[in-house]
Structures are given as C-alpha cells and as structure tokens.
Image (cartoon, rainbow, N blue to C red):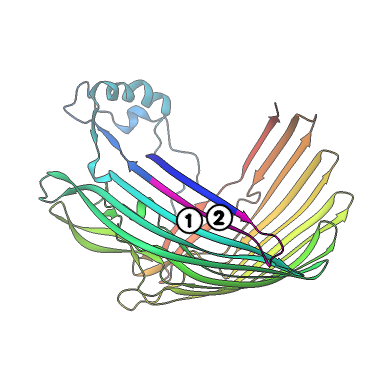
Amino acid sequence: MESKENYVQGDLTWDLTGSFIKDIKLGLKYRDNTVQNHRTIGTVGPGSTGWQSFSLADLSTGPSPLLSQAAATSGSLTQYAWVNDALAASKGFAMYDKGMVYNEAKGEYYKIQEKITAAYVKADFAADKWRGDFGVRLVKTEQTSEAYQDLTGKGNHVIGSTTRTYNDVLPSLNVVYDLRKDLIIRGAIARVMARNTYSDLSASTEVSGTTNAATAGNPLLKPYHADQAEIGAEWYFADASMLSATLFTKRLDTFIYTSTAQENVGGVTRPVTRPHNADNGAVINGLELQWQQAFGNGFGAIVNYTFTDAKAGSIAGGQKLNVIGNSRNQLNASGYYEKNGISFRLSYNYRSKSYGGLDEGGQDVTSAYGQWDATANWDITPKISLFATAVNLTNSVIRTNTTDGLPVGVYENGARYSVGVRAKF
C-alpha cells in the first residue's frame, strides 16, 4: 500500500487588547491525498518448472503441539497435522523459486484520492472567571475511488471509478468557568465528522482463494457526522490529584455495518460482504468519572469509568442493531510507584460486551473482557534506562458469538513479555 499527501496551509492570528475577545485565528488548508493498494500473487502447481509432489509423510515429523487449551470447548481440535519447517525448506521450497509465476491480483487493487479544502476561524475569549473559544470549520471533500471491474465475467478487467463531493459546516464552542481556584466547570458543544477507512471506501471486489465468497468496499459510503455536547466538573483537591465527572451526549446521523448478499461477480453468483450506511443513526448518552490521587512517597492511583447508553435506529430491512463497537461499561484502573528513577505500574482494563457487524443472520457479540498489564522502568543513568512490560498477565480469552447464539470465534490473546534498554543520545 502506498500513500502520498501534498498539502499547503496558511494561518493568521490577530491579537486584541482590552476586549472580551482576546484573539482571532483563521486559516486555510488544502490537502491532496492519494492511497493505492496493490497485491502480487505467485502461483505454482503441477506442470510448473521443477514441480515435485510430496505427501504429508514426506514433510512431517509428527503432529503439532497442543494448542488453544484455554479457549477449547468440548469437541474442539487441539492438535493438527504439522509440517516440519526444515523439511519443507529443504524439499519443498526450492521448487517454488524456479516455478513461481507472479501476477497482479487485479481484484484487490484500488486507488482512492481525496482533495480536501478547509477554511476555519476561531476566537478565544476571557472575562473574569470565564474563558474559552468558539469557531467554525468549512470543509469540502472531493473523493474518487477506482478499481478494476470485470464487466464481462471473462477476465477482461478495465478501470472503473466513482467520484463524489460533499461539504460540511462544523461549528464548535468550548467554555470554562473557574468556580473556585481548585474547582472548574467545563462545557462544550460541536458538530464533528469522520471519514470512513480506505478499505471500506474501496471500489474493488476481492474473491476468496479458498471459497466462493467475496468481500468488497463501498465508495458511496457517507461519512459519520455527530452533534455532540458535554458538561463536566473537575476538582483539584490536592497536588497531582483530581476528581472529575462529565455528562455527554452524541447524535450520529449514520453508522457503518456490514452485510452479505448474493451478487454477480465476474459472471459468477457469489456471497459478497460489503459495508453500508445505516438509514438511521444512533443516540449515545453517557457519564465519565475519573479519580487520580498521589498518596505520597511515590505511590498513587488513577481510575476512570465510563457508562454509555447507546441506541441505534433500524438498518435496511427494518432490523435493529446495537451500536457497533460500543460497550455499556468501561473501566481502567492503575496503581503506580514513581520515585528516584524507578517506576512501576499495574493496570486493569475492562469492557462489557460489545457488538460487531451482521453475521449468519445475527449480530456479532464479543463477550465482556478484562486484562491485567504491568510495566516497570529503572533509570540506571540519566541517559540509560532498563524497562520491562507484561501484557495480559492472566492470558484472558476473547470470545465472540452472534445474537442468535452461533459461535463465531475464540481469540486466545496470550500473555506477552518484553525487556529492553533505552538510551538517549
């Protein structure tokens, strides 16, 4: 994948004195961004130069080690046929060097160009205990997505492209009120947007090499837009210590989901999975709480919790989905020690069940998940430090099912450890 961006930007600040408005900032930015995805596939087989046929017995020294012990359920395979790497290299791989034929995988090629023009203005203000800023950003996006299209079903690929243009007006207001020296009230309101991923915007259709299925993008996807607001309070009750609470709300005009339908691809009817915009958006309301405190002698704690109540509209066909990627409860808690060049942190991260795309008539559901992580650092000298990290200490397992109860997959995340030295020059 190759990505290139050219841009030009100019900004101007106008400072004011003796006024409620302290300064005005304005600017203009133009971006021309292009991303291209290429894939070359090598093929070889009977009839190719130097081809030899081997049985499993020729390349194996026995079955695999036992696998997925923590994730296995009754009847799961935990041991598989195993090819010995050394035997495969000495007997099998040599013929690939001689006989491999390489061709571009035209079905996986895509090129997306985005030309984005933005003009923006912001004013900072302050008076007595009030301060903040307000402004607006005007954005024009021109997007072209191209890919190979096999219009005849006979391998006669030609480049096809889809172009679209859309404009956005994105205002924002941020306000801070110093209720006391140690107590701050904050509020914000804004309209924001986010573009979709390049793979989702791709015009290409990739046919699986092992099944009849295909995956595709959708160059006509609309970006996400949200009207959002929040209000919160922060109490700095001691040095390096804080309690805060924030209420927030978001109104999304759409969200992205995937579905599978029968389509004609290259003259063959196949199940094709592609992303779509939901006809209706989502309403997300929530509360965020944070506690941070230094206990003294280098010890401290940081805890934050977020509750999110998310409701989505119906998608095409009337089916109602849970908001994709959302968890109702999320918690992060860390205890730390930092003193005399030595630091240690132990963290626990948890999220309740979350939702994915459509699958086998239901919606993917990832079970609640939590994991423990740890980091340590020792500054041996001002320029050299020794560090160690441990991720997922208890080897927590991620499980996904559909809302219809069908198993989708189990991911054994695995504990990971690393030790190293950092040097500053």
Magenta residues span 14-32
In the picture shown, does residue 355 fall above or below 102? below
Q: Residues within 10 Å of mark 2 (few under 14, many from 20)?
A: some
Residue plotted at (31% across, 59% down) = 165
Quadrant in the rendering for residue 140: bottom left
Predominant SS of the magenta segment: strand
Say whether residue 196 is left or right of residue 399: left
Outermost residue on the right side: it is 297
Is there a contact, CB below 8 Å, between mark 2 and mark 1?
yes
Residue plotted at (30% across, 45% down) = 111
Q: Residues within 10 Å of mark 1 (few under 14, many from 20)?
A: some
Residue 205 placement (x, y as % from top left): 25, 51
Say whether residue 96 is left or right of residue 291: left
3 or 48, which lies in front?
A: 3
In the picture shown, does residue 392 fall above or below 402? above
Residue plotted at (15% across, 44% down) = 157
